[in-house]
Image (tube, grey):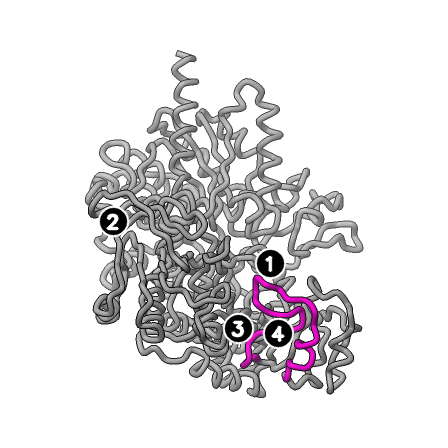
Amino acid sequence: MNIAGVLDVEALEEYAKNLPDVAYAKSIKYACSDSGLKEMADAIKEHDLDRVVIACCSPKLHEHTFRNLLKECGLNPFMLAIANVREQCSWVHSGVEANLKARDLIRMAVARAKNLKPLETVRIPVKKPVLVIGGGVAGITASLILANFTKVYLVEKSPTIGGHMALLNEVFPTNDCSICILAPKMSEVWKNPNVEVITNAEVKEVRGFVGNFRVKIVKHPRFVDEEKCKGCIEFCSDVCPIYVSKEMRKAIFLPIPQAIPLCALIDAEHCIGCMLCVEACPENAIDFEQREEEIEVEVGAIIVATGFKVSSSGSEGVITLMQLERLLSASGPTKGRLVVNGKTPKRIAFVLCAGSRDRNEKPYCSRVCCLATLKNALTIKRRYPNAEIWIFYIDMRAYYEELYERVQSMGVKFVRAKVAKIEGNRIFFENTLSGEVRSEEFDLIVLATPMEGNSELSEVLGIATDENGFFMPAHPKLRPVETNVRGIFLAGTASGPMDVKESVESAGLASSKALEIVLSDYVESEPFYSFINEEKCIGCGICVESCDFKAIRINERKKAEINPSACAGCGVCVASCPKNAIDMNYFSESAVIAEIDALAEEKNSDPLILMFACKYCAYSALDLAGVMKVKYPANVRTVMVPCSGRVRPEWIVHALKRGIDGVIVAGCRLGECHFGKGNFRARNRVEALRELLGDEAFRVKAVWRSAGEVEIAKDIEEFVEEVRRWKEALR
């Protein structure tokens, strides 16, 4: 059911007509459709409206659509307020409560609209280069596309580009040699004059905004001269006395035979400084004097193609699918021979969903593991026909049915089972078809471990991650490669499990989005920033300390001054100012107070709860709860704030004084704020206010949730119950 399936739309229309200053109200089917937009445009022109309130789906979905509508009608596009009566009302509530909540949300949106001011976008010149972070197949693909039009910086954390695909044996469904089809692309991107490949390097800092990002890159020393080294490796590696058994290599090594750049690397963690490699190298390429190098670049857009993390196995005779790929690969440490502990295993078990599809581990499916297992089982059977292979699976999710049937026909045994534990080389399991509980011993156990999110750069980039640690797209269907930060895009498995084909496709889309920016002469920056009232400002500098974007300085007049281009629009400085000398042009004090007062006018819920939810995470979590139909009490009314750090304690006190029973401040998970330390500052303010409230401290609650955590519904339920018990005790 959608909005009209739950809400009495006609009654809400009549209610809206009678609100103060409302000149026109009309219910429209499918407001975001062409016909709906035309109907609204006609009404705006006919009734000479100067601001618009739309009660519809989440503003995170179609706000831009409706802003464009206003622009086409000759209105300032920012004279728009949206009441979220779908994801946060009709999709999670029902009956009278849903309709009363919708009335409140509409009334609050009207109050906000009355306090809106026309804003003008700012045109900012665009830097033409693009930064691609990650040199796997997605990063390489994106770089080659972009290089046809502009300069590219390709930064790879590892000592070679190629990523996980370079380590694979074969790729399905055609069973092509993986490195055979990837190596030409690796060489092409390395030789492309428009691509600067920076390996063994990390992005340490990103500042600025769309069109004008300033990026600090740290290149780590290899202790081998890239220009002198010929990649011959046998001289230096043969004399090295240190063997790193976990990775089956020496302390000086070439990552893969086809490495690009073709240059050895010294593992400083394991090197003992014996200098034997220095004596052995015929090119005098060993250089222990190398130090970290800091590189700064300016780019107009960023593509994040950081891939996924791989789990490691835990004991002898137990390896992961990725380790098996290296053993089967002709370029691997055993030259393609399946040898474990010096022998070729005769009984081999594959355990699917090892650590995934489990609420205590990784709850998601990695999508490619079943097919990768079938592919490797087929490879082993072809090379070693007498090998006995078992595949333990929960559900077989193989969309190449022909491959599944071929593996079955070769005598591989499929066991639908839940593996309870692995001890040594013995697997204990329950056959879920027969109910039989038993154990089997194998020479080799291969675990299909999950792809894990590789979101180490989340804080540096300021982009959201989901509950599984993958970077989160702005919208999973309509904006799959865009992020919450304009100008930063996602490619490949950075946003979730994908196969090679899907990674290449996403890289193409991310490239086209980046080119939309850098091929323009300028970008229009949304005019969301804070400003100073100099008459109130005392030059204390608290705002300077609170700004994580270095957008504020104290000028020669001893007054704070904000650079609008550098301002991230979080509002943390506004809430920090002891003299109320800072306000925001798009999220003003007057608009928020008006919403609180509008909510207090009609108490349509008992108890009545006000929630301030940060735009990027907590508000998105509420939207996700709606999408997933996760119900929670209809007592809460939400005000979307740019950051939880924008919430002033004065708002909370004002709400409580106006008769609102409880207030929730909901932000990103601590340590994952998109605006630096905004949520830590919010937490400190809430804790200080709770201390002042004494016995009634429970009326104010702070919750910290990622955009993917629908558990925020449980937070609301628990808070509502606590406040309800308090009110009942008062009676």
Q: Determine whether the residue tagged by mark 1 lies in a helix, strand or loop.
A: helix
Residue 592 place in picture, x, y as percent: 49, 40
Q: Which residue is mark 4?
A: 199
Marks 2 and 3 sit apart, C-alpha to C-alpha, by: 70 Å
* Mark 2 or mark 4: whose residue is earlier in sequence: 2
Residue 514 at what x, y percent from top left?
A: 48, 73
Disc 2/disc 4 C-alpha distance (Å): 59 Å
Between residue 410 and residue 311, name the one nearer to us: 410
Out of 208 and 372, give the one closest to the viewer.
372
- Indicate the secondary structure of the residue bearing disc 3: loop
Which residue, given by chain and number where applicable, does mark 3 sit on? 333
* Mark-to-mark CA distance, 4 and 1: 19 Å
Q: Which residue is mark 1?
A: 460
The structure residue drawn at horizontal position 25% and vertical position 49%, both measured from the top left corner, is 26
Query: What amino acid type should be assigned to the residue bearing mark 2?
Result: Lys
Specify the quadrant of the image occupied by residue 85: top left
Q: Residues within 10 Å of mark 4 (few under 14, many from 20)?
A: many
Q: Is residue 25 left or right of residue 538?
A: left
Which numbered tag is attached to residue 26? 2
Magenta residues (range): 232-259
122 or 418: nearer the eye?
418
Q: How far across and down, in percent of the image, does residue 545 sit? A: 71, 47
Labels 3 and 1: the sequence-earlier one: 3
Q: Are marks 1 and 2 in contact (CB under 8 Å)?
A: no
In this picture, is 585 found above or below 600?
below
Task: Name the residue type under label 4.
Answer: Thr
Alpha-carbon span between mark 3 and mark 1: 36 Å
